[in-house]
């Protein structure tokens, strides 16, 4: 598959996922499913993600690429479990970030989405899972785009990228958690919810920085060696 075709599939899938969330928000206003709109939005988002997975499987993907995605997703999922007791520390984000940066946007999205799904078999599945899959997938996809724009990004750029996504991931997840679990939903309760999550989001951002400073350049170097040896074609 060409780079243009692969990116087109990724963009269409992300648009479908966004449309699913918006549709869920709209349906949440309907009286019949007012109390269950979060579940409906999660189901619609799951369908959008399945569309992406189906398009990925139907594309001309090499077995080597599939193997790399599977291994990286497994590592990202397993790495999340031992750090679960420490609020906000997410090595998954770091691994998804460097995976997308080296192997491209489509692979990065797949690593992030699969890592979220796989790790939640240990952490607990729920209506939040599709949203975590989407947002971690977007981390990998955006890292892939960064790899195209800045293939030799400085340490400052990568650290800044990790900080931004440390906060952005939490803020995006809050959109789902606030609307589903907080009642009554007012500006005050929304502000309090975001304020309460700020320490955790800060820990997420700081852990991204720490993981990258400790392991980032070395991991990227190793992954690039794998890419070169397997004659990986950027998508």
Image: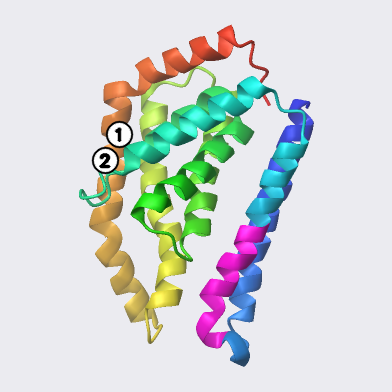
- Structure colour scheme: rainbow
Q: Residue at x 20, y 48 (%)?
A: 86
The image position of residue 213, as x and y in percent, is 29, 25
Q: Residue at x 40, y 32 (%)?
A: 75
Q: Which residue is mark 2?
A: 206
Would you call the spot at circle 1 few (<14 residues within 10 Å), some (14-19), or many (20 or more)?
Answer: many
**Image vertical order of residue 72 relative to residue 180, above or below:** above
**SS category of the residue bearing label 2:** helix
Give the distance between the C-alpha atoms of the residues marked 1 and 2, in whole angstroms.
5 Å
Residue farthest front in this picture: 121
**Image vertical order of residue 57 relative to residue 27, above or below:** above
Residue farthest bottom in this picture: 31
The image position of residue 153, as x and y in percent, is 47, 21
Residue 37 versus residue 153: which sits nearer the camera?
Answer: 37
Would you call the spot at circle 2 few (<14 residues within 10 Å), some (14-19), or many (20 or more)?
Answer: many
Q: Residue at x 30, y 44 (%)?
A: 81
Q: Is residue 113 left or right of residue 92?
A: right
**Image vertical order of residue 224 relative to residue 76, above or below:** above
**Image vertical order of residue 234 relative to residue 159, above or below:** above
Based on the displayed image, in which of its 4 quarters is residue 109 positioned?
Answer: top right
Q: Main secondary structure of the magenta part?
A: helix
Tag 1 near tag 2, CB within 8 Å = yes
On the rendered image, what quadrant is the C terminus found in?
A: top right
- Magenta-highlighted residues: 34-47
Q: Residue at x 67, y 56 (%)?
A: 48
Residue 226 versus residue 158: which sits nearer the camera?
Answer: 226
**SS category of the residue bearing label 1:** helix
Q: Which residue is mark 1?
A: 209
Q: Is residue 152 left or right of residue 81?
A: right
Q: Is residue 69 left or right of residue 154?
A: right
Q: Is residue 161 visible?
A: no
The image position of residue 61, as x and y in percent, is 71, 28
């Amino acid at each position: 598959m060409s780079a243009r075709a692969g990116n087109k599939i990724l963009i269409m899938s992300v648009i479908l996922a966004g449309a699913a969330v918006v549709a869920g928000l709209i349906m949440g206003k309907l009286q019949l499913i007012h109390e269950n709109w979060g579940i409906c939005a999660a189901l619609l988002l799951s369908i959008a993600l399945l569309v992406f997975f189906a398009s990925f499987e139907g594309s001309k993907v090499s077995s080597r690429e599939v193997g790399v995605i599977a291994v990286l997703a497994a590592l990202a999922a397993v790495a999340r479990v031992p750090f679960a007791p420490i609020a906000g520390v997410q090595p998954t984000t770091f691994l998804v970030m460097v995976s997308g940066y080296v192997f491209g946007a489509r692979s990065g999205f797949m690593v992030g989405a699969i890592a979220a799904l796989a790790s939640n078999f240990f952490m607990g599945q729920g209506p939040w899972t599709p949203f975590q899959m989407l947002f971690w997938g977007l981390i990998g996809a955006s890292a892939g785009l960064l790899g195209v724009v800045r293939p030799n990004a400085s340490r400052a750029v990568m650290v800044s990228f990790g900080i931004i996504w440390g906060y952005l991931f939490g803020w995006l997840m809050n959109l789902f958690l606030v609307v589903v679990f907080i009642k009554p939903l007012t500006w005050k309760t929304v502000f309090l919810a975001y304020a309460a999550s700020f320490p955790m989001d800060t820990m997420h951002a700081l852990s991204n920085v720490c993981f990258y400073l400790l392991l980032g350049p070395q991991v990227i170097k190793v992954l690039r060696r794998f890419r070169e040896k397997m004659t990986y074609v950027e998508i």
